């Protein structure tokens, strides 16, 4: 609960994203999966080219033990549903209600109902709105799922927090399948939707999409879904169950939890609750990197192992790079994003041998977008997912240093470009201080 309150305070005051320090991250890494050595076969070779004085070589058996043990501590690729960071508004937050109350207000699979209605203010013409008596219930949703359901991996990230909340495989029915049930015929330009909000208009958290995004999937994106499972398990109340919206390419605020109402509208502009607070409502996920572990103190001339993650945004991920700056050497003031610094490539880790996240049987469910029939990824790293990286930095003389990491996306843009503004999602270059001393 305290955590929830903290997040909400952060959000409502629109504070800058807090830098992610290794110590703060630790509590969230509740499920370190010991990744098998065999899996990182390729790493040695990549590492050796990254740092010329690195003791790495192309042979697995020669893999630097310092780096390997740092890699062994990296969080799992998928996050257990209960380990997601929670961003939920409401007094009380709906997932804290008693079981009895939840069943009274439709927050259980047995009691859930979803209405699809026309916007009274900007009506869309519908032949068959799904109002009160005709509202969809969970068993009907499951019937739709038998005909057509999808699963895709996606990282959930709050536009205002920056550090991903969790990585999941989300399962659901394409929203458009439901929209067609309402038989829209005309005057439909936007779809907005909201969830249970303690029956208090003031607490409503609403999001919206242009109808075109719902009816068709541009740029090979997965569809927008009515999501009922996460990592193979029924969606918990905390994650927005029984049903939440999940918008693959969007920041978290588009993925409304405890979904109750879908409104088909002829409104031509966005009307998301997140508009308040100066948020950029049309921003797809950005690519950026951050550290997971950096030693605070190192002995002179001893190599340091550094690990981290990258959020792979809409423009993909080509590289993760790191740069160590001696505090005594000031970078040039007109190079805001350190574009001319001597960045070195880190290693983007291969797919893990264990996915984590509490997947039943530990296997990727079949079929899942982006994975083949044997449960292996078709491409790596995966767009809209997470990737992990590691680097072995050469030993340094005594002094105070700043470690920075950044991504290069598939278009060649170096973080925080091409979209550096904070209100379209976090992409600022992280900086971590460390000291080299005896
Ligand atoms: N009904 C409702 N849905 C919501 C929210 C909310 O407060 N109420 N928060 C949104 C925001 S801002 C984010 S970032 C994500 C967080 O999802 P998570 O709590 O599952 O990590 O949920 C979104 N869906
Ligand atoms: Mo958010």
Image (spheres, grey):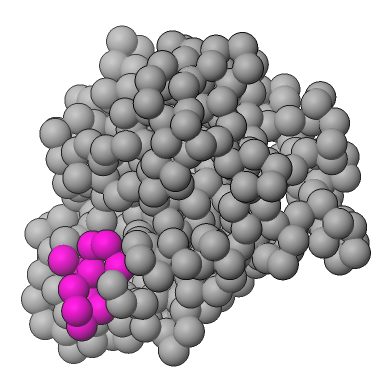
Q: How many marks?
A: 0
Q: Is residue 52 left or right of residue 284?
A: left
Is residue 373 rendered magenta in the image? yes
Q: Is residue 319 left or right of residue 324?
A: left
Q: Is residue 396 left or right of residue 59?
A: right
**Magenta segment, principal secondary structure?**
loop
Residue 307, percent across and down?
39, 60
Residue 384, percent across and down?
33, 48
Residue 118's place in the image compared with 25, above or below, is: above
Looking at the image, which residue is at 10% across and 59% down? 49
Camera-side residue of 57 and 33: 33
Residue 196, percent across and down?
74, 43
Camera-side residue of 332 and 260: 260
Residue 192's place in the image compared with 172, above or below, is: above
Start and end of the magenta stretch? 368-378
Camera-side residue of 232 and 39: 232
Residue 236's place in the image compared with 319, above or below, is: below
Is residue 295 rendered magenta in the image? no
Camera-side residue of 148 and 84: 148
């Amino acid at each position: 609960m305290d955590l929830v309150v903290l997040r909400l305070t952060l959000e409502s005051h629109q504070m800058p994203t807090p830098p992610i320090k290794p110590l703060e991250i630790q509590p969230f890494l509740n499920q370190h999966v010991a990744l098998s050595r065999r899996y990182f076969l390729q790493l040695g070779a990549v590492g050796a080219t990254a740092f010329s004085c690195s003791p790495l070589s192309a042979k697995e058996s020669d893999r630097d033990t310092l780096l390997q043990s740092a890699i062994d501590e990296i969080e799992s690729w998928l996050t257990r549903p209960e380990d997601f960071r929670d961003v939920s508004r409401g007094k009380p937050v709906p997932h804290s209600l008693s079981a009895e109350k939840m069943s009274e207000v439709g927050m259980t699979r047995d009691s859930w109902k979803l209405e699809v209605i026309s916007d009274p203010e900007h009506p869309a013409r519908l032949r068959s709105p799904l109002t009160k008596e005709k509202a969809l219930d969970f068993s009907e949703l499951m019937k739709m799922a038998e005909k057509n359901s999808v699963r895709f991996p996606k990282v959930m990230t709050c536009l205002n927090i920056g550090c991903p909340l969790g990585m999941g495989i989300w399962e659901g029915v394409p929203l458009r399948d439901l929209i067609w049930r309402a038989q829209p015929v005309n005057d439909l330009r936007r779809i907005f939707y909201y969830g249970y909000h303690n029956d208090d208009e003031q607490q409503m958290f609403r999001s919206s999409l242009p109808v075109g995004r719902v009816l068709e999937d541009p740029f090979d994106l997965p569809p927008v879904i009515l999501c009922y499972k996460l990592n193979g398990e029924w969606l918990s109340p905390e994650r927005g169950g029984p049903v939440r919206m999940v918008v693959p390419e969007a920041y978290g605020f588009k993925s409304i939890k405890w979904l109750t109402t879908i409104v088909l509208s002829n409104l031509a502009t966005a009307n998301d609750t997140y508009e308040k607070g100066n948020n950029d409502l049309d921003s797809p996920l950005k690519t950026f990197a951050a550290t997971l572990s950096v030693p605070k103190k190192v002995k002179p001339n001893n190599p340091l192992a550094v690990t981290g993650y990258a959020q792979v945004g809409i423009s993909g991920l080509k590289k993760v790079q790191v740069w160590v700056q001696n505090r005594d050497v000031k970078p040039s003031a007109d190079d805001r994003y350190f574009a001319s610094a001597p960045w070195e490539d880190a290693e983007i880790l291969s797919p893990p041998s264990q996915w984590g996240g509490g997947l039943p049987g530990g296997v990727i469910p079949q079929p899942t977008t982006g994975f083949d029939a044997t449960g292996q990824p078709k491409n790596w790293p995966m767009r809209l997912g997470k990737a992990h990286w590691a680097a072995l930095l050469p030993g340094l003389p005594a002094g105070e240093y700043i470690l920075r990491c950044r991504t290069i996306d598939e278009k060649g843009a170096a973080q925080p470009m091409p979209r550096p503004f904070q209100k379209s999602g976090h992409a600022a270059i992280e900086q971590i201080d460390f000291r080299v001393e005896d």
